[in-house]
Image (spheres, helix red, strand yellow):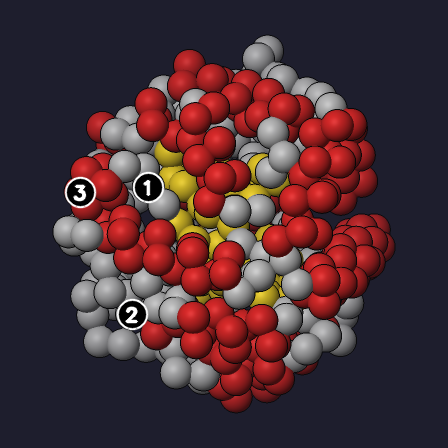
Amino acid sequence: MLGTMVSFGYRVVRTTDLRLLWKMAYNFGYKGIRSVQHFKKRLKQGKTFPPFLYISITNSCNLRCQGCWVDVDKPQSTISFQDMNRLINNAKSYGNSFFGILGGEPFLHPDLMRILKEHPDCYFQIFTNGHAITDKVASELRKLGNATPLISVEGTEAVSDVRRGRKGVLNRTLAGIEASIRNRLITGVASSVCQSNFNDLVKESWINYLIDKGVHYAWFHTYRPVGPVANSQLALDPEQGLELRKFIIEMRNRKPIGIIDAYYDDKGEALCPAATGISHHISPFGDIEPCPVIQFANESIRDNQGNLFETMTKSPLLNDFRRTAAKATQGCIVLERPDLLKEIVERNGAKDTTLRKMAMPELIKMRSRPSQYNPGNEIPEENWIYRFAKKHWFFGFGAYS
């Protein structure tokens, strides 16, 4: 295990710009830890303001992926530079320094680079399909030094073409990964694990492939059948969820690559980041939602003269969601209890935040299915670094007590 971590450290130092490593270590590592400490203190005061915010800055995208819940085929909507600047500055004033940037496709936002440049004291993780990452773009990201591209790959070429709704998707994605690596960016690959790619991704050869490509970290998340074209047949069963968890634990011990998951604490007990309050989502229209797949809201980033902290800490909808979800399950309430989510929405009079205005009919059509919560089958972290980090900075925060 120690040898694996040493090899990983050596590989990262050898293949990235040391200035970027320092930026990540300070803006995300040190300041991220401090933001979680602020979060803990606020919880004791009865105030919940997430240390990690995920922001979908545009609904536009060049792909049409299976199971996507974003209105990518509707007229473009973006969060303006002014709104983003105010949002980030307000969050920074309460100790935040990390922001996940989602879409649509974030690189279709005309001011993405300007946003990153405006906040050199923050760290941004950009969720992207990689198609817009040329050497020129990657070089600019390297100069800025405060962002990591997290590039989504869904499996083999055949699977990617079907999942992404276009031909030749994988080759363009790989070109984006290669441009990022050439320019010595800290580069990640995200994969939505489902029935059609499970056998391709949940195996050692996939991790070896990423390492050979020069990728520094991988993020595995599980497919959620939500949105206008939800495909329940792609969802994993409990046995596959358990196999994926075992695979991640084993690869963390044996392979010199970072591996992220966002569903379990150090003991292997399931959690929902939105239910614990460690993370919430902001839509391309500025709506404040519990998480990206729950497209209902009552509040906006423009409420209270842009005071995001005031709006989020006093939101009846968010408070009700966290309390109700945590009481019902340690897993995903969207999957396990769509009926209960419907009650929360109706109880708070929450509005549909989509352009298609079909979020409630889609929710009503959903049927209960398993999520990451699998009591009696918890698998604790074995790698001491992941175990230590999760024990102190990524756990239930008392939500399930």
The residue type indicated by label 1 comes to Glu
Side (left or right) of 210 relative to 391:
left
| Residue 379 appears left or right of 155 | right
Q: Amino acid at mark 3?
A: Val
Q: Amino acid at mark 2?
A: Ser
**Alpha carbons under labels 3 and 2: distance apart:** 20 Å
Compared with residue 250, is residue 99 higher up or lower down, i.e. above or below?
A: below
Query: Image quarter for residue 57?
Result: bottom left
Residue 162 circle label: 3
- The residue identified by callout 1 is 154
Sequence-first tag of 1 and 3: 1
Under circle 2, the secondary element is loop
Circle 1 sits in a helix, a strand or a loop, which is it?
Answer: loop
The answer to whether 32 appears left or right of 214 in the picture is right
Q: Position of residue 195 (x, y in %)?
A: 29, 27
List the residue tagged with mark 2: 60
Depth check, mark 1 against mark 2: the one in front is 1
